[in-house]
Amino acid sequence: MANIRQSVETNKKLLIIIAVLLVFILTFLFKFYNNQKKENRALRLKLLSMSETKRTPKSWAQLMAVKAPVTTTANAQAAAQQPAAETNSNNPASTQATQNIDAQDTQELAVRLNGQMKKVKTLDEANIDNNIAIADEIISREPDSYGAYKAKLISLLTKEGKFNEPADDTEVEGLLENMAQFNLSTDNMARREAALISNTNGEIQNVESQLDALARQRETLESQLSTFDANSPQLADANAQLQQIEEQEAQLTSNIDTLEDNLAQNTAQISSEDVVEIPFMRMMAKNDYESVLDNAQSFINQFPNSPTGYFYMIRALDQMGQKDQSLNLIKNSQLPLDTQQALLQRLDTQAAEDPKNYWQKLSF
C-alpha cells in the first residue's frame, strides 16, 4: 500500500514537471513567433506588393462622383424630423458626429470623408473616430476602394501620434496588407491616390502649416458667433472673416492637390515603398531601434538594391549614437551611385526630424 502511495506521488511530481516544461516551451514559442512576426513585417509587405496577383483599385474620384440630389416628399419629411442637434449650424463638429452613416449613400460618405481628410491633422479625437467609422462603412460596401483603406490608416496613425492613443497593431497590419495587394502602377490616377508619404518636404508642409493656422482662426471665430446679437456689426464682420478663411482654405487645399499630383508623376516607386515604410516609422516613433535594425537587415538581405532598409537602419543607428557605423553602411552597400546620392540627400533633409512626428507627413 505504501509503495502504491509513493508511486502516485512520484507520478504527480512528474506530471507537474511536464506541465511546467510545456508552459515554458509554449511561452518561448509564442514570444519567438511574435518577434519573428514583428521583425519581418515590412519585408512581408514588400513581398505582398510584388505579387503577380494584384487587386484592381476602385478610384476614389469615382466614389466621389456625387449624383444631383433628388428631393422627394419622403426626404423632405425625414429632414424636417431630424433632431435639433443634427441641424445646429453653430456646432459643425457635433452635427458631423451625430449624422447617421448608414443612411448616407457611398458617394455622400466619400465626399464627406474626403473633406475631413484634407484637414485631418487639425481634427479633434471625436472627428477622427468619425473618419474611421466612415472609412469602415465605405470598405464594407466597396472593398476595392484603396482610398478608404488609406483614409482609415492615416486617421488611426494621426490619432496615435497626436493624442497618444496606441493603434491596434493587428488592425494597422491588416490595412497595410490590404493596401500592399492593390495594383497601383496602371495609371496616373492610381499612383496619385497611392501617395501616402509626402516627399516634397517644405512645400506641402508649408501649405499645411498655413491651413493649420487658418483652422485655428476659424475655430476662434466660430466660438464667438453665439456671443453676438443677430443684427450686430460684429456678427456680420465675423461671418465675412469666416467666408474669407474658407476661400483661403479652399485655395490652399487646391495647392496641395497640385503639389501631390506633381509628386505622383515624378516619383517612380511611390505605389509600393510608401506602405512598406509605415512599420519602420511606427517602430522608430516607439524608440524600438533594435526591432528597426533587425527588420532593416532582413529587408536589405532580400532587397540589397532598395534604399528603404538602409535609410531606416542608418536612422536607428544615429538615434542610438552609432553615427560612425551608419556612415559605412552606404559606402559598403550594393546601391547604385545615383541611389546612394538620393539616399544621402534624404538622410540629410530628415536628420533633424523627430521620428515621433512621422504622422504629420502622411498625406491623403
Image (cartoon, rainbow, N blue to C red):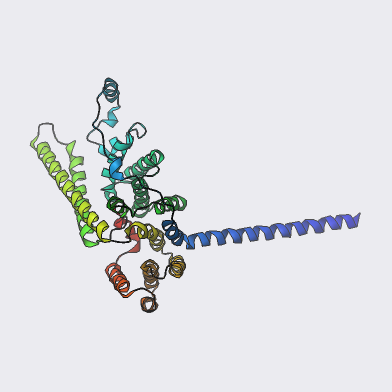
Name the outermost residue toward the right: 1
Residue at image location 17% in from the left, 43% down from the top:
221
Q: Is residue 24 left or right of residue 352?
A: right
Q: At which x and y percent is residue 259? A: 21, 56
What residue lies at 48% left-to-right and 60% top-to-bottom?
38
| Residue at left offset 20%, top offset 59% | 203
Left or right of 308? Residue 2 is right
Q: Tell me how many marks there are.
A: 0
Quadrant of the image containing the N terminus? bottom right
The location of residue 324, given as percent across then percent down, is 37, 79
Q: Nearer the viewer, residue 172 or 302?
A: 302
Q: Position of residue 175 (x, y in %)?
A: 41, 50
- The image quarter in which residue 237 lies: top left
Q: Position of residue 329 (x, y in %)?
A: 39, 76
In screen coordinates, is 18 left or right of 48? right
Q: Residue furthest left?
A: 233
Res 95 → quadrant: top left
Residue 354 versus residue 331 in the image, above or below: above
Residue at 30 percent across and 45 percent down: it is: 60
